[in-house]
């Protein structure tokens, strides 16, 4: 009887072992599938933005630049008077149009942040990347401050681009712009953290998701040769990420030093000072 029970027990153990291995294999395949889905989604967002911008440019190019002049002998306006009127109106109209366009852009950017529309915000940043990096940086920071939960908004906006390996960023790949936009959002969020008088609240689920993402990011770097082999924007992105959301337990001081070393810290050193968690790790 005892031998029978022992035999049944061993059989159950073997069955459970087989089931466990199948579950692990399923999780592995699921994560791979999720990576591909995220990659396709971000690529579609970027291509959609470029397509819309291309249509806008083509419309501008095909629009008639000269309106045919129609004249009649009666009630004809003298040319000199017309030029004077046009000249007097042009500066005012230009200023009003520029002000109106600026206000529209501002309201759109603030609206995306206030409504926590992370997908729309990412598309907007991708399509206006060069402007936000330079002349509209303060506007973007102000908009981010208006978000009810800026930490969650930025985390969702960044997405999971970091799971894509080096091969995804070939020349002319739409993922390059998407990655630049995500890293820019981390820079802006770190500025918001540094300028905030009180510590910005990061909810526990957001904190946990960010920790999992940071660990997954590091694992991907290790699979490609280690943190010390990371390219500049990859190292900078992960460094900014942990500076914003916290340093997981799996990160060693050597990992942080390598990230600082390869992220061209001279360009972002002033931003890193705004991270309370990172400052404690930097001698």
Image (spheres, rainbow, N blue to C red):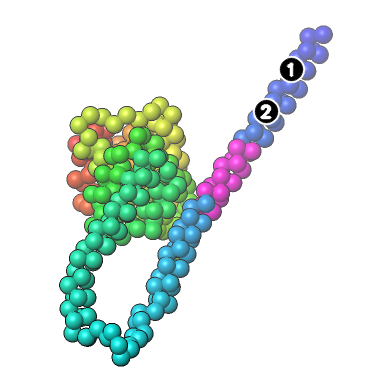
Image quadrant holding the C terminus, namely: top left
Residue 129 higher or lower than 76, as above or below: above
Residue at 41% of width from left, 76% of height from top? 63
Image quadrant holding the N terminus, namely: top right
| SS class, disc 1 | helix
Main SS of the magenta segment?
Answer: helix
Residue at 39% of width from left, 56% of height from top? 126
Residue 33 is covered by the magenta coloring: yes
State the residue lying farthest toward the bottom. Answer: 73
Write down the quadrant of residue 277 in the picture. top left
Q: Position of residue 74 (x, y in %)?
A: 30, 88
Asked whether residue 127 appears in the rendered view, the answer is yes
The residue wearing badge 1 is 9
Write down the quadrant of residue 130 in the picture. bottom left
| SS class, disc 2 | helix
Residue 1 higher or lower than 214, as above or below: above
The residue wearing badge 2 is 17
On screen, residue 122 versus residue 265, left or right, reads right
On screen, residue 188 versus residue 229, left or right, reads left
Which range of residues does the magenta coloring cover? 25-40
Residue at 22% of width from left, 52% of height from top? 267
In depth, the one of 107 and 33 nearer the eye is 107
Residue at 20% of width from left, 38% of height from top? 195
Q: Is disc 2 surrounded by few (<14), some (14 to 19) or many (20+) residues within 10 Å?
A: few
Q: Where is residue 147 in the image (x, y as percent from the top left)?
A: 34, 38
Residue 91 higher or lower than 185, as above or below: below
Q: Is disc 1 surrounded by few (<14), some (14 to 19) or many (20+) residues within 10 Å?
A: few
Q: Earlier in the sequence, mark 1 or mark 2?
A: 1
In depth, the one of 22 and 140 nearer the eye is 140
Q: Where is residue 37 in the image (x, y as percent from the top left)?
A: 56, 49
């Amino acid at each position: 009887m005892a031998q029978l029970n022992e035999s049944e027990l061993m059989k159950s153990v073997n069955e459970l072992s087989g089931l466990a291995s199948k579950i692990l294999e399923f999780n592995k395949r699921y994560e791979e599938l999720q990576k591909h889905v995220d990659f396709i989604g971000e690529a579609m967002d970027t291509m959609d933005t470029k397509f819309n911008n291309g249509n806008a440019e083509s419309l501008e190019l095909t629009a008639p630049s000269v309106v045919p002049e129609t004249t009649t002998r009666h009630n004809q306006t003298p040319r000199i008077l017309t030029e004077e009127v046009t000249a007097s109106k042009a500066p005012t109209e230009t200023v009003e149009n520029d002000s109106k366009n600026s206000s529209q852009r501002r309201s759109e950017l603030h609206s995306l942040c206030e409504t926590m529309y992370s997908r729309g915000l990412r598309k907007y940043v991708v399509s206006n990347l060069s402007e936000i990096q330079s002349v509209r940086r303060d506007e973007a920071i102000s908009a981010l401050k208006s978000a009810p939960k800026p930490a969650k908004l930025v985390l969702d906006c960044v997405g999971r681009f970091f799971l894509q390996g080096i091969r995804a960023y070939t020349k002319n790949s739409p993922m390059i712009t998407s990655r630049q936009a995500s890293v820019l959002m981390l820079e802006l969020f770190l500025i918001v953290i540094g300028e905030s008088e009180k510590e910005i609240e990061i909810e526990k689920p957001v904190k946990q998701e960010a920790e999992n993402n940071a660990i997954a990011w590091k694992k991907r770097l290790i699979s490609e040769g280690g943190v010390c082999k990371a390219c500049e924007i990859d190292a900078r992105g992960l460094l900014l990420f942990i500076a914003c959301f916290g340093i997981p337990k799996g990160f060693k001081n050597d990992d942080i030093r390598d990230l600082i070393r390869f992220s061209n810290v001279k360009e972002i050193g002033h931003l890193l000072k705004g991270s309370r968690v990172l400052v404690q790790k930097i001698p």
